[in-house]
Amino acid sequence: MRQVQSIQVIEYHNFTVLELQKKQILKTDMTEVFETEVIKLRNHLKNQTSPYLLQHSWQPVDWYPWCEEAFARAKAEDKPVFLSIGYSTCHWCHVMAHESFEDKEVAEELNRNFISIKVDREERPDIDSIYMDACVLFTGNGGWPASIFLTPEQKPFYAGTYFPKHGSYGRIGFLDLLRAVNSRWRQEREKLLQSADVLNGQLREEQNVRDSELSWQHLSLHAVRWFKKNFDESNGGFGDAPKFPMAHNLMFLMEYYRVNRDRRALEMAEKTLIQMYRGGIFDHIGGGFSRYSTDKYFLVPHFEKMLYDNGLLLMAYTQAYSLTGKEIYREVVRKTAQYIQREMTDSHGGFYSAQDADCQGVEGKYYVFACEELTSLLGASAGKKFNEYFNITAEGNFEGGSIPNRLGDDLEEETGKGAESDYSHTEPERLLPKVYAYRKHRHSLFLDDKILTSWNGLMIGAFARMYRVFGQESYLRQAKAALAFLEKQKSGFDTLFVSCRQGSCQGRGFLTDYAFYIFGLIELYGGALEQNYLEQAERYCRKALELFADHEKGGFYFCGLENERLIADFKETYDGAIPGGNSVMAYNLVKLWQITGRELWREEAEKQLKFLAAFAERYPAGQCFSLLAALLYQNPPEHITCVLKEEEDLKKLQKLYGRDADIVVLWEESREYERINHRATLYICRDGSCRPPVNL
């Protein structure tokens, strides 16, 4: 048993038997390899649970996690801090790790003159956000890995992203950078400290934005105009490469169409959704979407798959189906949900974070095929049809191989509207399980198996919405199981954690954890119509107000009263690849008011929308989830209060009204709501007026 565990650790850190042979450290007993060669390289990351930190725990760099001990040592030894921020499935993080952090010369320079700290951005989004802002202030852009140099007081004085070990073409190498920073720290420290103080002041400076004088109708219109101006007519999406899915932008456009009947808004959303599915950004063999497209065609992705992208895209394709009835959108949801259930779900119900872009050190190797590979696997005739169907060619489309795609196919015509199409029953589609099994056997992907509360809340919401629209019980079971897993990990505490891995929970929750968890609960209540989910949503929303709300200036801080105090407080005021905590809280507050009718939630929703309107005026297209909340506030769905009698009444109610309406379920009569004719009775209100009660 001990030997098996040792082999798993070696494989986990991307060691293979072949690599060990090249290093000339292979022993006849694999346990001896682990104990004599790997354990010596362990640093202060050895007891961490983050897969990203563990990837670096065997390196010769004397890494610390973010902790007081590291900064205390920096002060005692009068050294600057090198802070490296990344995540486990990041391609360029892997490249810099291999080039520099595994390198003896670089490690000696870091260990001699710096205190080195490694941070998983997914476990510590607070640290990542502050120092990414610093990186943008220094360089004009950001990204991962983030490479930041700090004073022992945590103040940044230099920042960048990826650095190669040796410089070329005018770009400084990491080794030269370390020597230059050390020299300046020793000889020109006052200048460095002055720049650190100036930057620290900029990071601490809160945006003072006047209240917007524009209505949310005008702000929505401005956002739609921006999307129309920047829409790529030929390829879908907005602007040029790289193209990110940004599913919440598409969700806003579809909701804008539903409310205002602007056909162009729907056309832009549909074109983008179809093109993303056609392209290589969608995994046609195994399902699910990659993080973004490196080209304007959605053909060549950055191959890592993130839970949050797939959760948001599941909601977007579900919304598209609900609006149009086109079977292509149901098909995308089915395949993506299958991928999540098959590869991204813990045995106890939680959802994993991500899958790597790299395989055996090569980006995309897992996903790319050669023609002859598939004709050999499937036979000449079937293989030829399969290759033609998925555009797998001899010349290839990515570094000599082919990323399966369906660009050029008219999928809308092929699948149409209405009844279930025969799309999934074509011969190439029937061969997918065989190709999928072959691909899994051929190579393997690294899985980041930590379970993040925020991203899980998002995926719970996605599966709950899918159940409401498609009525598939497995979707509801999946959402419930994930929530039950998260609640069990909390062990009775009324505060949320950031992440969980192998039974160990890390960190008190940030605003995004609360915002998305509440979102998931609200959506799950809408699907299951079980009162306890609504009660939990209200309880956590009150907790979020207590921990994060700025009652003086409005909005919510990212860090709350239970989080570590860093060098700056900040508020997320724009949506990025994932909606910001303030936008999601606006949506949550609006929904809680509309479902419960409580005055508290109406007041808080109006305050939050007022706070966000000022930022939406500056950049409306960066506030799409807030715009969604505002559209919902101004155009509430049908509200139904139901006095039910039997369990069968609930199933009938869900089938008839569950897709769109806000529903409150009562099992006992009251003075306001009673059963008519001793049968289940509905009280339906819409557009500020209520109809006479009717029997279900």
Image: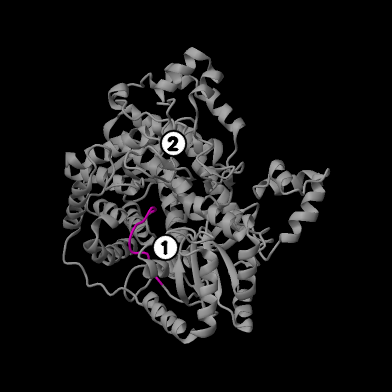
Identified by mark 2, the residue type is Phe
> Which residue is farthest bottom?
190
Residue topped by disc 2 = 398
- Count of all numbered marks drawn on residues in the image: 2
Above or below, 72 relative to 431: below
Q: Which residues are magenta?
A: 570-578
Around disc 2, counting alpha carbons within 10 Å, would you say few (fewer than 14), some (14 to 19), or many (20 or more)?
some
Residue 605 percent coordinates (x, y): 30, 61
Residue drawn at the location 51% of the way across and 19% of the way down? 375
Residue drawn at the location 64% of the way across and 47% of the way down? 14
Above or below, 496 relative to 332: below
Name the residue nearer the viewer: 101 or 566. 101
Residue 444 percent coordinates (x, y): 60, 38
Quick one: SS at disc 1?
A: loop
Quarter containing the C terminus: top left
Name the residue nearer the viewer: 417 or 467. 417
Query: Residue 75's image quarter?
Result: bottom right
Residue topped by disc 1 = 170
Quarter containing the N terminus: top right
Q: Is residue 653 visible?
A: no
What secondary structure prevails in the magenta region? loop
Above or below, 576 relative to 212: above
Identified by mark 1, the residue type is Gly
Residue drawn at the location 68% of the way across and 58% of the way down? 58
Residue 573 included in the magenta stretch of the image: yes
